[in-house]
């Protein structure tokens, strides 16, 4: 067995792993990045980028459908599944090439193959052993299913959903979280009949309930049907369809059942526990600094419990590379990480929901304000409804910002700054927002919370 020595050995070349690799090499470390599939991981090849390309194609279809409303004559002749696929794959290929070029330019050694953590601070790949002064685990996650619900045929996960050659006519989506509502939104825009089944009482159940209810209304108007608060019982498929039965006996049939019930950590059989890394339900346990229990072994990304988001993986990868280089990097609380669901309308949030703020600070210490996008000129122009909700501590800082409406994902950064810098609405109110922009709706909420509403009562 050949031994290769590096300063940092990284297992997994997705968002977390490659971010750690880029930053560590920038800081002068010799880095090996081990990847069994393609650099870029889930986000680039099977997650964020391809799904957002689909959502953009869906948005174009919707614009064509509603073009008459703004006086533009256009007819939607149909969706060319192969054309959408070519567009999506083109974007992914370009980003992948760019990433490979960047990794090469930074002098990072990429090792192709499946790696296994060993107890002596090394990773083996076939007959080669990569020894690191530090090791970073970044093996990511996989689509989970429910007990007894086997993936195959018409029962698919997001990976197979992306690979479909045709646009389905009728789809059932199991799970009303981020991935479920994004696919539901795309398929509806492409003309499918879509039913979402969610066991909890609301769609996007982790969001402030004002956003969940707003999204439910918007989806209903779009003709997306959903069943809330009843659990899935079973699914059966034959040559022509799949039928889902819920615990109350209701049944739904479709061409496909998309199982979008969450993602589990990819940590099985990789030598983690044998090397002294503690797992809980498969997730790697770390301290605040992302150190595992095994000395010199760190973990980042979806294998670490918390928000499974690409930008959280970037953040953690960068932070770990800097800590390895001896820099003091404070941990960023999960509540300061922005969350965007890119369905139509979009859902974006940062910080505490009103319920969480009340649970933490008490009902008397929390004030919230909701501004309806109907009062916002730019939103009217682009034809979106929605809401901006800001939660603050009474006489204190902004605790949470919650947005619903087309394009609001681009506005969440301002909310993130407000929450992370513990700004008071009074600090932000004098900073006038450009007119006419959707960001003015946020400005209106800050003005109102500072006691001087402008276009509101
Ligand atoms: C459909 C979908 C849509 C999404 N949309 C968004 C979005 O819009 N925004 C967002 O922020 N997040 C989104 N996500 C989540 C995002 O993709 C993940 O949070 C992110 O990819 C996690 O990064 P990671 O580095 O932890 O893992 P991954 O990106 O999964 O990378 C892990 C890598 O490790 C490799 N690997 C695993 N085991 C081994 C081994 N033994 N040896 C070598 N290599 C190994 C894998 O091949 C993989 O490339 C989406 C996810 C999905 C599924």
Image (spheres, grey):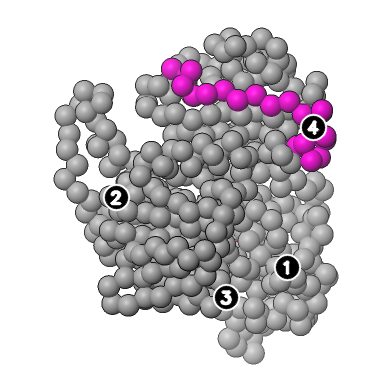
Residue numbers of the magenta segment:
357-377
Q: Nearer the viewer, mark 2 or mark 4?
A: 4
**Where does label 1 land, which residue?**
284
In the image, ligand 1 is in what quadrant? bottom right
In the rendered image, the vertical position of residue 284 relative to residue 195, given as above or below: below
Q: Circle 3: is it few (<14), some (14-19), or many (20+) Cα within 10 Å?
A: few
**Lateral position of residue 334 relative to residue 125, left or right:** right
- Front position in the image: 386 or 25: 386
Where 375 falls versus 117 (above or below)? Answer: above
Q: Nearer the viewer, mark 2 or mark 1?
A: 2
Which one is earlier in the sequence, the residue at label 1 or at label 4?
1
Q: Are marks 1 and 3 in contact (CB under 8 Å)?
A: no
Q: Which residue is mark 2?
A: 190
If you read the primary sequence from the N terminus, does the residue marked by circle 2 or circle 1 appear first? 2
Q: CA distance from mark 2 to mark 4?
A: 44 Å
CA distance for labels 1 and 3: 22 Å
| Residue at numbered disc 3 | 147
Q: Residues within 10 Å of mark 1 (few under 14, many from 20)?
A: many
Residue identified by numbered label 4: 363
| Residue 453 location (% of width, % of height) | 62, 11
């Amino acid at each position: 067995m050949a031994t290769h020595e590096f300063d940092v050995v990284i297992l997994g070349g997705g968002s977390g792993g490659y971010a750690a690799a880029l930053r560590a090499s920038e800081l002068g470390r010799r880095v090996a990045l081990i990847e069994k599939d393609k650099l870029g991981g889930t986000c680039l090849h099977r997650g964020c980028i391809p799904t957002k390309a689909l959502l953009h194609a869906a948005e174009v279809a919707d614009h064509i459908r509603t073009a008459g409303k703004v006086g533009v004559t256009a007819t939607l002749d149909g969706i060319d599944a192969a054309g959408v696929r070519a567009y999506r794959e083109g974007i992914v290929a370009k980003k992948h090439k760019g990433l490979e070029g960047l990794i090469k330019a930074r002098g990072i050694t990429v090792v192709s193959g499946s790696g296994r953590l060993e107890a002596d601070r090394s990773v083996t790949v076939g007959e080669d052993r990569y020894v690191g002064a530090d090791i970073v685990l970044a093996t990511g996650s996989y689509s989970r299913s429910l007990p007894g619900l086997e993936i195959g045929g018409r029962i698919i996960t997001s990976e197979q959903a992306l690979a479909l050659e045709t646009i389905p006519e009728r789809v059932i989506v199991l799970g009303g979280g981020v991935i479920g509502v994004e696919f539901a939104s795309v398929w509806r825009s492409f003309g499918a009949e879509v039913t979402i089944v969610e066991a909890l009482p609301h769609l996007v159940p982790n969001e402030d309930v004002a956003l969940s209810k707003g999204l439910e209304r918007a989806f209903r108007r779009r003709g997306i049907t959903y069943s809330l608060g009843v659990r899935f019982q079973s699914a059966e498929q034959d040559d022509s369809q799949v039928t889902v039965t819920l615990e109350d006996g209701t049944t739904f049939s479709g061409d496909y059942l998309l199982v979008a019930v969450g993602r589990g950590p990819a940590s099985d059989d990789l030598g983690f526990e044998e090397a002294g890394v503690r797992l809980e339900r498969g997730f790697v346990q770390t301290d605040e600094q992302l150190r595992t229990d095994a000395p010199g072994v760190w973990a980042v990304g979806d294998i670490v419990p918390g928000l499974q988001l690409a930008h959280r993986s970037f953040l953690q990868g960068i932070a770990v590379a800097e800590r390895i280089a001896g820099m003091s990097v404070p941990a960023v609380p999960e509540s300061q990480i922005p969350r965007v669901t890119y369905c139509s309308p979009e859902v974006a949030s940062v910080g505490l929901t009103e319920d969480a703020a009340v649970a933490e600070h008490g009902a008397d210490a929390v004030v919230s304000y909701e501004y309806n996008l109907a009062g916002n000129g730019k939103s009217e122009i682009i034809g979106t409804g929605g809401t901006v909700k800001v939660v603050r501590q009474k006489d204190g800082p902004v605790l949470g910002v919650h947005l619903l409406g087309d394009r609001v994902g681009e506005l969440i950064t301002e909310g993130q700054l407000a929450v992370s810098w513990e700004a008071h609405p009074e600090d932000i109110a004098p900073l006038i927002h450009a007119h006419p922009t959707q960001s003015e709706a946020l400005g209106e909420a800050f003005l109102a919370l500072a006691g001087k509403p402008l276009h509101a009562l």
